[in-house]
Image (tube, helix red, strand yellow):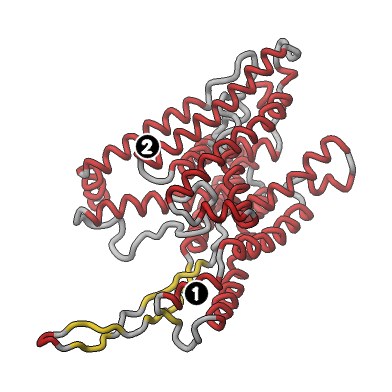
């Protein structure tokens, strides 16, 4: 406890870090207040009852309760994330965007501007669909002005949330977009835990609740291992000539370095892609009423989860392939005079890296798929759906990754000021790759 207090004192004594933390907390407070400001003329209680299902609970969790509150920020930051994903995929297929990506800061600034415009377009499509869900709860649903004003307010709310996230990144601590998503997820944890506590208390199963907490901690532990897990490939650089005393020169051996290949280079993107596709049968079933779609419309069914599991494995390989280029890595090593011991530079190095990536991606993708379907297993054992969502899936990986990234920045400030880090031994490693687009710190 004494060491914790000393660490907090050290953090508070660094003026720049203190200002960043206070600014971040202020922006987070504004974001949370925004989720309770409802659209004019809407009954949020009726909307919350209508949206009490798997999709509604999932979307509500990412927005911090704003989705079922009919808040002016109900669409949350997800339209911006969607726009970022689209821009990243376009960067693979469109040469002009590829060129901008290679131009450094100026090109990235242009891409960010296009991403903002695309966010507005996506909000323009999502806002009417969202408003249509709570039309029965308003007094005058046919009023064109109410429709227009509600759409404008929802778009403005999302853009304001995006602005808050960018300001946190510039002037606060951590990555703003990631932090807002994590705050939205954690905001629902007290309510979900209290509901689980009441449920277990009524059933006389407080021991089971304790078992649940232990299992949750174990899942978090393995998620940290997945986020931080890397395969270090040794790299040797060519010998260099160094000056010696007396005007003589001698050949020196460059120190050995390592190329870290992440076990889960795709991050949470495979789960997002897979869940987006699995949501389509849910929407289709609400209109078509086809019996065999019921299994896919139920996120707790065996068919839904086994399909989701294999889709995540496929998308993990796909996203790793489009984000990591072994040929480019081999070319950069060759240009810088580096090589992998025992492997010829050039094509052989590329083939070696490609084979190694395929091997380490397999266990990473399987574990990612297991984490994604863990909430379904938790519900099978009697855990309420709200609390079960914290046992895995995108929410857990985002929380783990964001916390590690933020702690890594805090530790860097401490070490740069000659203070002890947050840990006695080792270093905190954040997500060096595989982040959600728009979430790179």
Q: Is 396 above or below relative to 344?
A: above
Q: Can residue 374 be seen in the rendering of this structure?
A: no
Q: Residue at x 67, y 63 (%)?
A: 313
Q: Is 220 above or below relative to 161?
A: below
Q: Can residue 121 be seen in the rendering of this structure?
A: yes
Mark nearer the N terminus (2 vs 1): 2
Report whether 230 appears left or right of 96: left
Residue that badge 2 annotates: 24
Label 1 Cα neighbours within 10 Å, binned few <14 / some 14-19 / many ≥20? some
Indicate the position of residue 271 as horizontal and vertical percent values: 63, 53
> Disc 2 or disc 1, which is closer to the eye?
1
Q: Mark 1 falls on what kind of element?
A: helix
Q: Nearer the viewer, residue 210 or 55?
A: 55
Q: How many tags in the picture?
A: 2
The image's mark for residue 198 is none
Q: Residue at x 71, y 17 (%)?
A: 137
Label 2 Cα neighbours within 10 Å, binned few <14 / some 14-19 / many ≥20? many
Q: Residue at x 55, y 83 (%)?
A: 348
Report whether 98 appears left or right of 137: left
Please say if the residues under marks 2 and 1 sit with CB atoms less than 8 Å apart.
no
Q: Quadrant of residue 39?
A: top right
Q: Nearer the viewer, residue 315 or 399?
A: 315
Residue at the extreme left of the image, as rendered? 246
Q: Mark 2 falls on what kind of element?
A: helix
**Marks 2 and 1, how far apart in space?**
41 Å
Indicate the position of residue 16 as horizontal and vertical percent values: 25, 42
Indicate the position of residue 290 as horizontal and vertical percent values: 89, 42
Q: Is 36 above or below relative to 433?
A: above
Q: Nearer the viewer, residue 265 or 84?
A: 84
Indicate the position of residue 129 as horizontal and vertical percent values: 72, 29
The image's mark for residue 331 is 1
């Amino acid at each position: 406890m004494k060491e914790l207090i000393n660490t907090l004192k050290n953090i508070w004594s660094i003026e720049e870090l203190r200002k960043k933390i206070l600014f971040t907390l202020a922006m987070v407070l504004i974001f949370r207040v925004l989720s309770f400001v409802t659209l004019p003329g809407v009954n949020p209680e009726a909307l919350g009852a209508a949206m009490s299902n798997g999709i509604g609970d999932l979307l509500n969790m990412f927005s911090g309760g704003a989705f079922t509150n009919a808040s002016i920020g109900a669409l949350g930051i997800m339209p911006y994330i969607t726009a970022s994903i689209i821009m990243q995929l376009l960067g693979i297929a469109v040469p002009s965007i590829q060129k901008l990506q290679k131009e450094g800061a100026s090109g990235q600034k242009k891409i960010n501007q296009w991403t903002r415009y695309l966010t507005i377009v996506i909000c323009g499509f999502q806002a009417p669909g969202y408003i249509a869900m709570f039309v029965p709860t308003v007094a005058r649903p046919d009023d064109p002005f109410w429709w227009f004003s509600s759409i404008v307010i929802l778009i403005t709310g999302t853009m304001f949330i995006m602005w808050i996230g960018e300001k946190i990144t510039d002037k606060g601590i951590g990555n703003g977009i990631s932090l807002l998503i994590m705050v939205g997820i954690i905001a629902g944890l007290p309510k979900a835990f209290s509901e689980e506590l009441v449920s277990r208390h009524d059933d006389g199963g407080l021991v089971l609740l304790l078992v649940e907490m232990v299992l949750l901690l174990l899942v978090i532990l393995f998620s940290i291992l997945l986020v931080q897990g890397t395969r270090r490939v040794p790299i040797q650089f060519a010998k260099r000539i160094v000056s010696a005393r007396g005007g003589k020169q001698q050949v020196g051996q460059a120190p050995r370095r390592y190329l870290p290949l992440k076990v889960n280079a795709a991050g949470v993107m495979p789960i997002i892609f897979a869940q987006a596709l699995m949501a389509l049968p849910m929407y289709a079933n609400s209109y078509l009423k086809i019996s065999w779609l019921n299994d896919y419309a139920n996120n707790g069914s065996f068919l839904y989860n086994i399909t989701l599991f294999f889709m995540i494995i496929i998308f993990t390989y796909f996203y790793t392939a489009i984000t990591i280029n072994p040929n480019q890595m081999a070319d950069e090593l060759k240009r810088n005079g580096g090589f992998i011991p025992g492997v010829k530079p050039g094509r052989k190095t590329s083939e070696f890296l490609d084979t190694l990536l395929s091997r380490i991606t397999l266990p990473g993708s399987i574990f990612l798929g297991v984490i994604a379907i863990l909430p379904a297993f938790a519900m099978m054992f009697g855990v309420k759906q709200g609390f079960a969502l914290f046992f895995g899936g995108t929410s857990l990986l985002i929380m783990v990754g964001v916390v590690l990234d933020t702690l890594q920045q805090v530790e860097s400030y401490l070490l740069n000021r000659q203070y002890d880090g947050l840990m006695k031994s080792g270093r905190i490693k954040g997500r060096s790759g595989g982040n959600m687009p728009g979430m790179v710190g």
